[in-house]
Image (spheres, grey):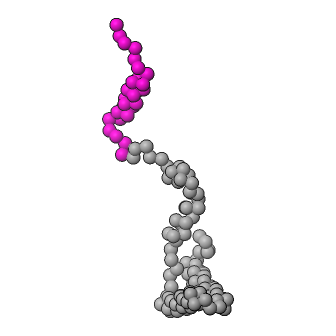
Amino acid sequence: MLKKRDPAAAAKAAAERSASASGKPNPFGAARPREETLKAKGVDVKLMDKKIEAKTTSTTRMTRQQREEADQLSQAVREAEDALREANENEMPENALRETLAAKRKILNDFMEQVAAANMQKVGGAPGM
C-alpha cells in the first residue's frame, strides 16, 4: 500500500519542477524594477531622476575670454568665502562679509546665465529644452 504524500514535500517538489522547467538558471534572479526597489528603501524616484538629469546636463560652453572672466569671478567668490570663514573663526563681525559674498555669488550666477542664454541663441533653441 502507498503512503500518503507529505504536503510540504509536494510543495517543494513543485517548486523544483518550476525552477528547472527552463533548464538553466535566470542570470538576473528575482530582479525587481528600479522604481520598486527604491520605493522599498523609501526614496522618491522622481526626485532622484531629477537629480541624475541635473548632473548629466551639458556644461556651458565658453570662449577663452568668457572662461577667464568666469575664473576671475569664481576666484573672487572663493576669496570672499575664505574671508568669511576667517572672520567666523576669529569671532569678528560677519554681516558685511556675508553681503559681499552674496553680491559676488549673484554676479557670478548672472554671468553664467548670460553665457548660457548666449549659447542657446547661437544654437537657436529655447532655454530649458
Residue 69 screen position, x and y as percent? 53, 92
Give the residue at x 50% y 69%. Answer: 56
Observer-nearest residue: 98 or 54? Answer: 98
Residue stretch rendered in magenta on the structure = 1-27
Magenta segment: does it hold 119? no
Q: Residue at x 40, y 44 (%)?
A: 29
> Which quadrant of the rendered structure holds the C terminus?
bottom right
Q: How many marks?
A: 0
Q: Nearer the viewer, residue 54 or 98?
A: 98
Which of the pair 48/122 is nearer the observer?
Answer: 48
In percent of the image, x 37 and y 34: which residue is there?
A: 19
Q: Residue furthest front?
A: 91
Where is residue 2, by image quadrant?
Answer: top left
Left/right placement of residue 17 relative to residue 122 reads left
Q: Is residue 70 visible?
A: no
Residue 60: x %, y % from top left = 52, 80
- Please determine whether, in this image, residue 13 is positioned above or below residue 100: above
